[in-house]
Image: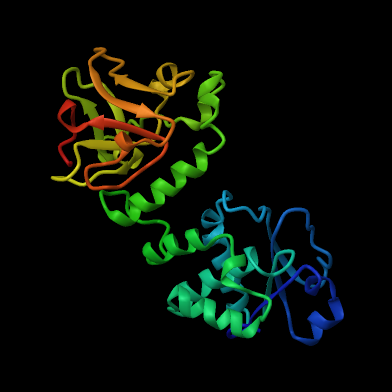
Amino acid sequence: MIVDDLWLGSCGAAGYKDKLKRNGITHILTVANGFDPLHPKDFKYKVIKIDDKVSEDLLEYFPECMDFIDDCMKEGGKVLVHCIAGKSRSVSVVLAWMMLRKSFELQAAIDLVMEKRKVVTREKINFLKQLEIYQELKCNLAVQKGLNVQYFKYKQFDLVKKMQDQVESWKDGSLDESMLAEVTTDKNEGIVECLQCQYALCARSNIVHYSAGHCQFIYVEPMQWMMETIKGTKSGDLSCPGCTKRIGNFSWLHSVSSKCSCYVSITPVFRLVTNKVHDSGL
């Protein structure tokens, strides 16, 4: 047991029905691929199918994991969180719950988990970066879509995660169009438009970095209107689809020129020149 009625273990621990019963376990949260519930008649299960890779997005599953653990606690039960070895994925979920519900700082939560479960080490937790983002977001993934540092950090992480398999695709033009964002038609969200022709280029929610008064560019997600320009080309200019005026540039690979004037570096980079576009809220 780590804290309260929250238990942490491996896939082996999840298989011993009698021992689980003796310890009062009522719920089992599996955070791994390839594991179906072993005793569905005896325990309440939730399965998060995810690999133990840094590139996986465990953050997006935190809310439903937290809800499952919370429901168990409300019912007066005990929950076992496990993956395969009980050293990374399941540890990350337990840490997230401790941060959210027990107000632990990340490092304090890690220290306690390592004290309670000796096989856990900081180096073996593959989702530390995501946990750091979770802490910076104050454990709230539903942060308001606005021009704030916390939201941008999540958007930058999300961009890199989504585009990691696409970075090489520009070479042969096999870019997956489903990875490119559509422009919302919701005017309440705020639309960034071409200054010359008012073509809708992106929404506020597509911005991954911008600091008013400091940035010469608005860094955005790759948009569908960019498709023909960014596939098959390492880097180049971005032109407005409405009037063909040059409004920005892009690069699939890291370069000094892709750094923002406030020293934030994002790769791949898709950016709009601030004095070429208009958004009354920026």
The residue under the point 26% across, 12% down is 244
Q: At which x and y percent is residue 112?
A: 55, 83
Q: Of all residues shown, which one is farthest toward the front?
A: 256
Tell whether 188 sits left or right of 269: left
The residue under the point 15% across, 37% down is 280
Tell whether 202 sits left or right of 57: left
Q: At which x and y percent is residue 91?
A: 61, 70
Q: Of all residues shown, which one is farthest toward the top?
A: 243
User: Which quadrant: the N terminus?
Assistant: bottom right
Tell whether 140 sits left or right of 202: right
Nearer to the camera, 55 or 60: 55
Residue 215 picture quarter: top left
Nearer to the camera, 113 or 233: 233
Q: At which x and y percent is residue 62?
A: 53, 61
User: Which quadrant: the C terminus?
Assistant: top left
The residue under the point 27% across, 47% down is 263
Q: At which x and y percent is residue 223?
A: 39, 28
- Identify whether 20 is placed above or below 91: below
Nearer to the camera, 74 or 133: 133
Tell whether 53 sits left or right of 62: right
Task: Indicate the colouring scheme.
Answer: rainbow
